[in-house]
Amino acid sequence: MGDLRQADFKDEYEDLCDHCLLVANVAYLLAEQMGHSQEECMEYARAGMAHDIGKLEIANIIRDRRTDILKIEEMKYIRNHPQLGYSLLYWEGGFSQIVMDSVRFHHENYDGTGYPENLVGEAIPYGARIIRICDVFSALVSERPYRPAYDKEMAMELMISEVKHFDMRMFLQFLSVVHSVKFDEIDRMIKITNRKGYIRLKRKNLIL
């Protein structure tokens, strides 16, 4: 059983890395579309790479306690991952305030319905608003154990239906990015990532 749990943790870690890499690349393109310098775009890409780092700390807490009864308790931990990620970056040192604030507030929604502080509109740090859009998109176009990946167009439709969660000015620029030639490489990355995720899921479901 210990070996299976370790394998599950490895798969979760790989999925998380793939997700963060996708968010980072999309964040770079969105920041570039918004008119930022290459250095600034790299900062938002770094924020994308680090935005879910708090989930690693959570995984260490709950990976040996995987039962259905604990699902609600786990969700409480999961909602703490932005603050945990911020703390990890703070104590590690060497990260800009842009990166740390983006990590801490990337689950805030523009209409104030997000967490951890229910910030509204411009009160949400600029980088966090970028990462919010890229994080949601990445989640939608990625395979999940409970659903297949949405294609890009369906992901766009779903995001438009919840557009109140996003900075509209940024979201309109994001739509332009998604339909640009530069996004072709992201499309290829998504296909490769989902193929890897499919293989890991099939391996996990094998009867031993």
Image (cartoon, rainbow, N blue to C red):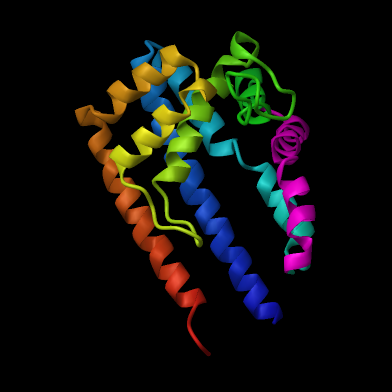
Res 159 seen here: yes
Point out residue 89 in the picture as x, y percentages from the top left corner. 70, 33
Outermost residue, left side: 181
191 with respect to 167 (left or right): left
Magenta-drawn stretch contains 92: yes
Point out residue 175 in the picture as x, y percentages from the top left corner. 32, 24
Prevailing secondary structure of the magenta residues: helix
The residue depicted at 79 percent of the width and 57 percent of the height is 61
133 with respect to 194 (left or right): right
Of the pair 76 and 208, the residue shown nearer to us: 76
Q: Residue 192's image quarter?
A: bottom left
Question: Height in image: 181 above or below 61?
Answer: above
Label total for image: 0
Q: Residue 64's image quarter?
A: bottom right
Point out residue 83 in the picture as x, y percentages from the top left corner. 75, 34
User: The magenta stretch spans which residues?
Assistant: 68-94
Point out residue 172 in the picture as x, y percentages from the top left corner. 36, 17
Outermost residue, bottom side: 208
Q: Residue 103's image quarter?
A: top right
Split into 4 quadrants, where in the image is the N terminus? bottom right
The residue depicted at 40 percent of the width and 57 percent of the height is 148
Res 186 seen here: no
Magenta-drawn stretch contains 192: no
The residue depicted at 27 percent of the width and 33 percent of the height is 183
